[in-house]
Amino acid sequence: MKTLVCISKTPDTTSKISFVDSGKNFNTDGISFIMNPYDEWYALVRAVELKEKVGGTVTAINVGDASNDLVIRKALAIGADDAIRVNANAPSSYFVAKQIAEIAKKENYDLIFLGKETIDYNGAEVGAQLAELLDLPFFSFVNHLEVEGKTNILKREIEGGEETIKVTGPCVISAAKDLAQQRIPNMQGIMMSKRKPLTVVEPIAVEELVSLITHDLPAPKKGVTLVNADNVDELVRLLHEEAKVI
Amino acid sequence: MSVLVVIEPSAGIINKGGFELATFGKETAALSATKCITLVLGNASNAGELGIYGIDEVLTIDIPTYDSVVYAKTIAEASKKLDASIVILKHNANGKAAAGRIAIKLNAGLVSAVNAVPVLNGAVLQVKRGVYSGKASATYAISSSIKVITVLGNSIKPNATGNALPVSELDLPKVTSTLELIDRKTMSGRAPLPEADLVVSGGRGFKGPENWDILLELADTLGATTACSRPVADADWRPHHEHVGQTGVAIRPNLYIAIGISGAIQHLAGVNSSKTIVVINKDPEAPFFKAADYGIVGDLFEVVPKLTAAIKKLKHE
Ligand SMILES: Cc1cc2nc3c(=O)[nH]c(=O)nc-3n(C[C@H](O)[C@H](O)[C@H](O)COP(=O)(O)OP(=O)(O)OC[C@H]3O[C@@H](n4cnc5c(N)ncnc54)[C@H](O)[C@@H]3O)c2cc1C
């Protein structure tokens, strides 16, 4: 089985967010970057598990500049066989989908995985666009996947529930919690990752339809009103009369 | 020209989320004085009520919404037929899975998770959304002639301005699905988390799953949906779909009551867009108090039952 896993780089979850250039750009000062948790913990690990079970290859793909090589090497350490980096700073999810589709359409991947969303942009946009560009079925928020030859049985999260779907042939899958268990790369994996091939390719031109105007930070909270634990009636009164939420 | 709003009923009925989306569409259409048309995917006994929210036309078409290929083909064809310049979908599992496909088909700019009615600037649509898991927001300009957006739950209050309308079926060539739906499970009872107005959430402070009764009683009294912190879901004290935060569900209810949760940055990321936050924690130094509107420093095992009793009293007055 031949799989492709899309990975992206995001700020660490503990990052304090700020912007420079009058709100245009993210302030990377003092920020450490990680592989997007949904890509790493669930999408990549499930692809590696399937390879271990039925054989085949796992290719990791990332759109980004050379500073992303660190997270790409981590994907190789966790178990991807090789990696491709499209050498560009992506201005949009459309750009990312176009670049990955350009590469994927030349190969016949059985499955293409990505995380259900990135924890910085939270768009959940790349998967559906990529699937459309490749004319493949797409499943969002998959938390269970079994592969039987060309048949895939998967479970996906929907609002307040879950669906089980059978699909035959290649498809694109966005990975949610429980699709796999997080793996910590071991020493052997880390050593091997240095020798695994990482191919750098140049991007194709994409016409952008969406542009960023600015970023804003939320207005600071006015501060907490503390109510004595012996006087919960007062809290209920405030919620009813002041906040008007109950 | 028109604004096309795609509505997914659940179990044969359009819920509050659908009427929110209708109001959102109506206000977006008002920006350019165009028609707002709702397309309901499947049967809904109350579809005509969309008219109450100022919609000009209510159409239906029955499709398998779990198949993003069929979903996107249908909406793209409908957009062409109805001359839609803006297509609005819900930012939920099916909406997210279809929006990207629709955008590609219509060569449209896409912005997802929009949380406020856009601003029209000439032919450019300006939209706002949260980024960095709610730690910041961003404004984008969509310059393509057709625009596709997905809208977060609780972004607008449904606003009744008109009368119910007759519902007619939209006639489009049938698209067949290649998928087989084997099973669909829905948790009945409480509103799904992303749509809930009121949420009561518990953390590790509860010590164990056997202690959740007091939280459930508080939630039942309020008519609230229940949530939890990540370690609580990881330990299987509560089902995984209740996990909120940066790596769980992101929510923005009117009221979020956090009980026995410390307020780690990853937890706050998923809940800090809530309109009012109440924190109950025995540690006055718990970081959550910095993000709260109201707080009680105290033992949850004493405070929660008292709070339930006080709310019952209010409801009886
Ligand atoms: C990459 C990453 C992603 C993460 N994503 C998420 C996420 O999406 N969501 C999430 O929630 N966490 C997430 N976390 C975990 C997060 O960092 C915290 O560990 C977690 O939120 C803590 O959960 P908690 O508040 O329930 O537990 P604790 O931090 O243990 O806090 C328990 C609180 O209960 C209080 N308490 C104890 N007993 C009582 C009592 N009797 N009465 C009143 N109060 C009491 C304590 O004072 C304490 O404040 C993530 C972490 C990482 C590294």
Image (cartoon, helix red, strand yellow):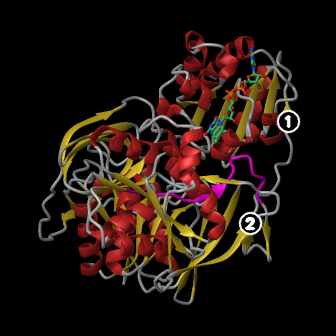
Q: Report helix, strand or loop for mark 1.
A: strand
Q: What is the tally of numbered marks visible in this picture?
A: 2
> Residue A173 appears at what percent x and percent y?
36, 52
Q: Is residue B95 left or right of residue B286?
A: left
Q: Which residue is mark 2?
A: A216
Report the image quarter containing ligand 1.
Answer: top right
Asked whether mark 1 lies closer than 8 Å to ligand 1, one says: no
Asked whether mark 2 lies closer than 8 Å to ligand 1, one says: no
Q: Report helix, strand or loop for mark 2.
A: strand
Distance from disc 2 to disc 1, alpha carbons, whole Å, reads 26 Å
Chain to which the residue tagged by mark 1 belongs: A
Whether B112 is drawn above or below B238: the answer is below
Closest to the observer, A179 or B303: A179
Instruction: Find out whether the residues at labels 2 and 1 contact each other: C-beta distance under 8 Å.
Output: no
Asked whether residue B136 is in view, the answer is: yes
Q: Which residue is mark 1?
A: A225
Determine the residue positioned at 52% across, 40% down. B196
Residue type highlighted by circle 2 = Asp
- Magenta span covers which residues? A4-17
Whether A45 is drawn above or below A208: the answer is above
Determine the residue positioned at 56% across, 9% down. B210
> Residue A9 appears at what percent x and percent y?
60, 59
